[in-house]
Amino acid sequence: MNGLRAVMVCLVLTCATVTSPAVAAKPAWSELAVPAAAPPVAVADLAARGSHEAWATGSEQTADGPRPTLYRWDGTAWSRDTAFPGADATGRLGKVRCVDDEVWILHVRDGAGEILRRSAAGAWSAVPLPQELRVHQDFTAVPGAAWVVGEDDTGLKVLRYDGSDWTAQPTPDGVLYLMGITARAADDAWAWADTATGTTVLRWDGTAWRDANVPLPPDSNVHTVLLEPSGRVTIGGTRYADGVPGTYLMTFDGHSWRTSHPPLGDTHTAGMVRGPDGALWLPVRSDRAFRSKYARVDGRRTTYSYGPERTNAIDVRPRALAKAGTSLLAFGTVEIYGSKPNLMSERLGG
């Protein structure tokens, strides 16, 4: 009897060891090769449609000035795309969005702006903005609508494209400057603005831009707003307490806002995304010159992970993250000792 009991105990322990998530191997960040650009380089944005398609935008330096750079991830490797209009001229690419089966990108050159559109068949076209802007601050697009916000010599401009025509949209009184914009649908867009009384979050409901009445922390700003199909909204920014900056997060569950202060120091949250595991992920300043560093915020718990070691690296900076199927993609810059910063990419999972 004792022998049988011993056998059963061993079997239970063995099963527990095999199935326990505590002993499961944690996914690690791996290095992905990126074709080099002409340094110094700038990274603007990263967006993914799924595990087999992602796009990264930015610019490289030439004798005539910055030239736009566009890279495509096919699920296996990064390649450079030079087929878009203006690829061989000075300029820069900004935000990129996957809209239905197309890719939409803000392109600025010679002071003029346009939206580049890539069809599912790979053909490029351009939609010029209706007027020149002195500053092209941000861009977003969803099925049925796109927005570009910026300034001209007369002040703030909000331009909305409905697929055929552009409309200049007014904003509430007191709005001085729009710092960013994002959208969930053609009748549901959010923007964060600078006003005479501080930072304010605005919302487009299909009829007008209105104050969203978000109870932002005092003496704070907004870096990003994440909109999810479920209706959840997450805002990331910096709050200044006694002159000391600290990161805050706000989450709206459809009924009320909840504010938290994860131990992220003064990390800029513009690169924050919702990962495939349901947690918030964002790049943070690394304490190891030869490795990148990422924070994972899941409720009240904040943990960290490091990217792969890079030989002779003195600064590794992921600039943007994107959920790509069941993995996370990072795109940024790496500076190797003795050379100028160039492009880097890493992946978690997959």
Image (tube, rainbow, N blue to C red):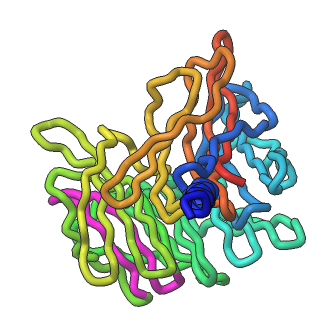
Q: Position of residue 266 (x, y in %)?
A: 31, 39
Residue at image position (73%, 43%) is 69
Residue 309 part of the magenta segment: no
Between residue 329 and residue 225, name the one nearer to us: 329
Residue 188 part of the magenta segment: yes
Q: Position of residue 83 (x, y in %)?
A: 87, 53
Q: Position of residue 244 (x, y in %)?
A: 18, 36
**Could you tell whether 336 is left or right of 212 in the image?**
right
Residue at image position (38%, 53%) is 223
Q: Is residue 176 above or below residue 207?
A: above
Going by the picture, which residue comes out furthest to the bottom?
Answer: 207
What residue span does the magenta drawing correspond to? 185-205
Going by the picture, which residue comes out furthest to the top?
Answer: 338
Q: Is residue 269 above or below residue 205?
A: above
Residue at image position (28%, 53%) is 248
Query: How many marks on residues?
Result: 0
Q: Quadrant of residue 205?
A: bottom left
Q: Quadrant of residue 89?
A: top right
Residue at image position (45%, 57%) is 280
Whether residue 143 is visible here, answered yes or no, is: yes
Whether residue 109 is visible here, answered yes or no, is: no
Q: Position of residue 186 (x, y in %)?
A: 53, 83
Which image quadrant: the N terminus?
bottom right
SS assignment for the magenta stretch, majority: strand
